[in-house]
Image: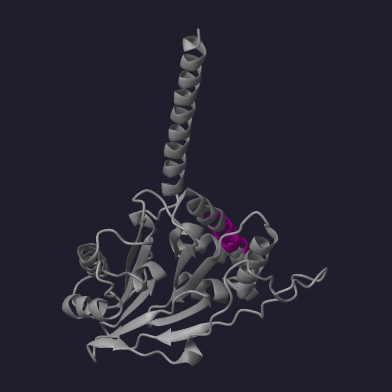
Amino acid sequence: MNEKPENDLLAQARQRIHFLERELEIFSDLAHTFDPPPSELPEVPWIDVYGESLPYNRQAGGDHIIYIDFKKRYKMEKLIRTAPENLKKKLRATAARAGILVLDVEGHDFSSAFIASVFHQAFLLGVSYELQFFGEITTTLFENINTRFFNSSGISKTLTMVYGEISENGTFRFISAAHPPPMVFSNKFNRLVAISEERLISFPQIGTMPSRGNSEITIPLLGVKEKYTVNEINLMGSGDILILYTDGLSDHRDENGHKYFPGRLEERLRENKHLSARDIFQRIKDDVIAFNSQPDDDITFVIIKNI
């Protein structure tokens, strides 16, 4: 007498599982629409850029890269032509640079990918307004995004971020929100070189506290974040390499607990420094997987080479 209800429950369970599986497939496809296609790789004279994210679950995760080739993405010639005279110079300078943003949302699942996609949309929308009103990306954009994430009480995951702009003379200006610091491989000295701490000022994780001036109603328990300041690194020599990365790379270990970073990374850079940014990335990616094919986190890194 109980066969029919049990069969009905089983059919309902299967239907529900099929629905959830389909939803995950759709979300995975949506998440990948935010992955930068090859056409978005920035093009700056004398600078070669390439990087990817390697999701822990092979589908989607919290690591994310946004490339900005201002000329291609924002139609800079038209903006310059129609801009007020006081913005034209700034817009021309911005058009000659490329922007690279590396984001790391806590976790390596679909919810982390969703938060990364929210950040992606907020950032790129903000950039369009920044260019129209200021002629360049200012720290105000990041202050507003930081406070917006702080006010989004449903977002409990932490976010770290580094955003920088590279010029054809090898100058890299950037801000960091609790993100691992950039590394520089010197072609002349054939090794990773130390960067002065004065050039590596970092700020709290995105959304942990509001930016000063954006929270006049109440002061949260943790206080307010001081205004972002901009760091600067100079890649003076031809062949020098700048690496942006997430902690998935810096914490990567083999099964015996030996770390990949920075020793083995330096070896691979030394061996492959003569190659293009894309080929350097691929050699390191292959070596990272050979070191341990089952990492504990998403892994992301970007190679920026002064050619």
| x 60%, y 69%: residue | 142
| x 37%, y 48%: residue | 59
| Residue 246 visible in the current orientation | no
Q: Nearer the viewer, residue 100 or 8?
A: 8
Q: Nearer the viewer, residue 259 or 122?
A: 259
Q: Residue furthest left?
A: 271
Q: Main secondary structure of the magenta part?
A: helix
Q: Residue furthest right?
A: 217
| x 57%, y 71%: residue | 205
Q: Quadrant of residue 46?
A: bottom left
From the viewer's perspective, is residue 225 above or below residue 50? below
**Residue 157: x, y in percent?**
56, 60
From the viewer's perspective, is residue 15 above or below residue 71? above
The verdict on residue 222 being magenta is no
Q: Nearer the viewer, residue 112 or 275?
A: 112
Q: Nearer the viewer, residue 261 or 182?
A: 261
From the viewer's perspective, is residue 255 above or below residue 185? above
**Residue 38: x, y in percent?**
33, 56
Segment tinted magenta in the rendering? 120-129
Q: Residue furthest top?
A: 1
Q: Classify the position of the C terminus by image quarter.
A: bottom left
**Residue 57: x, y in percent?**
36, 51
